[in-house]
Image (tube, helix red, strand yellow):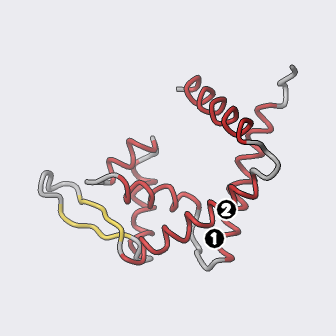
Amino acid sequence: MPNDNLFAHIAELFHAGKTALSREFQDAGLCYPPAFLKVTRLIDHIQPCTAQTIVQTLQRDKAQITRLLNDMEKQGLIKREPNPEDRRSQLLSLSEKGKEDLARMQAIEQQMMGKMMQGISDDERARLSRTLLQIRRNLS
């Protein structure tokens, strides 16, 4: 089976998904980049959560995460509290607005997933999921 265009197809799919998600967020009045969804979800699920936790989990540059968290705080999505275990860091949590917007972003994501998976059987979805996980493991 030829796979000479596979990398291009994966890159195009990623770009199309990111673009569509951004557009759907904007249409819903959620003027956030897609990275906000990932970080908001992490803060919601990982407790205690610090900026360093996000840096390590997402394998991103600390300065990039700091800028993102500053933007999220300015928009009222997160709260920061002193970390009693480490004075140099702060514990992150979602504000009420952050929790509400996360629920809205996840609903949009689910709608997009339904649209993306139209005409694809459960078996094909399971196979795709296994294949994508294997590709991820191969790159780690």
The residue that mark 2 highlights is 21
Instruction: Indicate the amino acid at tag 2.
Output: Leu
Report, in whole angstroms, how far the alpha carbon at label 1 lies from the one at label 2: 6 Å
- From this view, report whether residue 25 is shown above or below residue 139: below
Residue at x 69%, y 60% (from the top left corner) = 112
* Residue for point 46% across, 54% down: 64
SS class, disc 2: helix
Q: Quadrant of the N terminus?
A: top right
Q: Is residue 5 above or below residue 49?
A: above
Within 10 angstroms of label 1, few (less than 14), some, or many (20 or more) residues? many
Q: Along the horizontal axis of the image, is 96 left or right of 39?
A: left
User: Where 9 sits versus 1, above or below?
Assistant: below
Q: Residue 38: percent from the left, percent from the top?
A: 50, 55
Farthest residue, direction front: 122
Q: Is residue 51 left or right of residue 120?
A: left
- Pick whichever, 114 or 55, lies toward us: 114
**Residue placed farthest to the top in the image?**
1
> Quarter of the image holding residue 56?
top left
Q: Residue at x 45, y 57 (%)?
A: 41
Q: Where in the figure is residue 40, as x and y percent of width and height?
A: 44, 61
> In the picture, residue 32 is in which quadrant?
bottom right
Write down the quadrant of residue 70 in the picture: bottom left
Q: Tell me if residue 46 comes above or below residue 99 in the rendering.
A: above
- Which label number is shown at residue 78? none
Q: Secondary structure at mark 1?
A: helix
Instruction: Identify the residue at horizontal 64%, vertical 36% (top origin).
Output: 129
Q: Amino acid at mark 1?
A: Phe
- Assess disc 2: are there few (<14), some (14-19) or many (≥20) residues with their C-alpha within 10 Å of its C-alpha: some
x, y percentage for residue 37?
Answer: 52, 60
Task: Tell whether 14 sits left or right of 55.
Answer: right
**Residue on which disc 1 sits:** 25
Q: Are marks 1 and 2 in contact (CB under 8 Å)?
A: yes
